[in-house]
Amino acid sequence: MALPMAQQAKYWGVAGVMFLLLMYLMGDVLVPFLVGGAIAYFLDPVADRLQRAGMSRVAATALITLLMFLVVVLLVLAVIPTLIQQTSALVNAAPEISRNLQTFLTERFPELSDETSIMRKTLADIGDFIQSKGGDLAQGIVSSAMSVISAVIFIVVVPVVAFYLLLDWDKMVARVDAMIPRDHVATVRRLAGEIDDVLAGFVRGQLTVCLILGAYYSVALMLAGLQFGLVVGAIAGAVTFIPYVGAIIGGILAIGLALFQFWGDWVAIGIVAAIFAFGQFIEGNVLTPKLVGSSVGLHPVWLLLALSAFGALLGFAGMLIAVPVAASLGVLMRFAISQYQASVLYRGVDSVPPAPPAPTPVAHEHEKDVV
């Protein structure tokens, strides 16, 4: 017999509060383990596919780890130094870009030549603000991250955690499944499957889309001759995690920089715009339908709310769990709505079918004889 709903709600509520309290108290310590778990979750389908191809789980995990190590080494040696260099150059060039914008606007809007103009003062301050605060912001992010965890510990712990979690992923899932209350095992398995579908479609699929688009934008913009093409491509690819935002931010940034660099060369400016137009066409018609799917059930506004709320409450660790928690809450909310719509509270008493009449008692043979 199942426990009453009030007691179940109390137990699960206490478990949820303890989880949030644990994240609040130990969030900084758990960051490497959360990152390692996310990597293992992302790569588990690859390991499963290698197993189906005939490899053992140990061999598949070792092969994936080796390939990931080579990718990281390639990024560290080839991409990251250039990315840092271009980011620093973009920050330092902000005042000049701002002055060019001021000159451009002044030529076409003479009223801005008035030194008391608020718009002119604003434009003049933008570049100095970005230059002064851009480096401080980057340094603050790095220093805060280093204050949370040691870089050496992070680099060492994350691969080890990801390796062992990926190696034992199926065993852990089976162990968790064995701990599900038997009265609710079918419902929990169904909800867990829906949550996994949302995460697989959004996290795995959208992250793959981000990597592909980021690489495409970076390479294409650099080939087009844009000075900060790698930075713009990285930004556009990263922000693509939030649908439509990446294209808008990346497109505005790239076309704006192209206007300053290639002013008068409308062919070059058109090439930069065409790069983003083609990227959006490929994303909307090929990448997103194939890798993400049409109905992952995670609305961009809901994602932004989860990232903001959990980031404010739990810091960087909260941002790492924001997407899984948002996906889980979305599935649970849809389940609660479906249960509500099937209940008497929603449908009304009249919709409840009447109870079948009680069966007429049948007299036994010896009772008939007595009668």
Image (cartoon, rainbow, N blue to C red):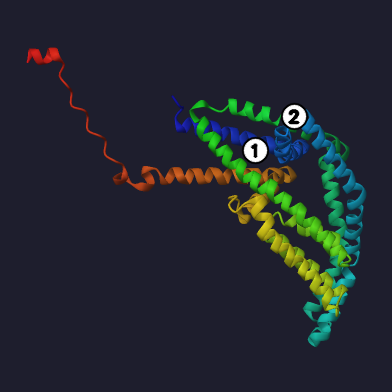
Q: Which residue is mark 1?
A: 20
Answer yes or no: is residue 82 visible: yes
Q: Residue furthest bottom?
A: 110
Residue 318 point in image, percent of width and height: 70, 44
In-image side of 105 versus 241 (left or right): right
Residue type at mark 1 is Leu
Q: Quadrant of residue 158?
A: top right
Local crowd size for mark 2, using a 10 Å CA cut-off: few (<14), some (14–19), many (≥20): some
Residue nearer the viewer, 345 or 243: 243
Residue 184's place in the image compared with 317, above or below, is: above
Answer yes or no: is residue 259 visible: no
Secondary structure state at the residue bearing disc 1 = helix
Nearest to N terminus: mark 2 or mark 1: 1
Q: Residue furthest front?
A: 54
Q: Which mark is residue 296?
A: none
In-image side of 186 versus 299 (left or right): left
Q: Quadrant of the C terminus?
A: top left
Residue nearer the viewer, 119 or 82: 82
Residue 333 point in image, percent of width and height: 52, 45
Residue nearer the viewer, 165 or 316: 165
Q: Which residue occupies 89% across, 66% down? A: 227
Q: Which residue occupies 68% across, 43% down? A: 321
Residue type at mark 2 is Arg
Disc 2/disc 1 C-alpha distance (Å) = 33 Å
Residue 111's place in the image compared with 302, above or below, is: below
Q: Which residue is mark 2?
A: 57
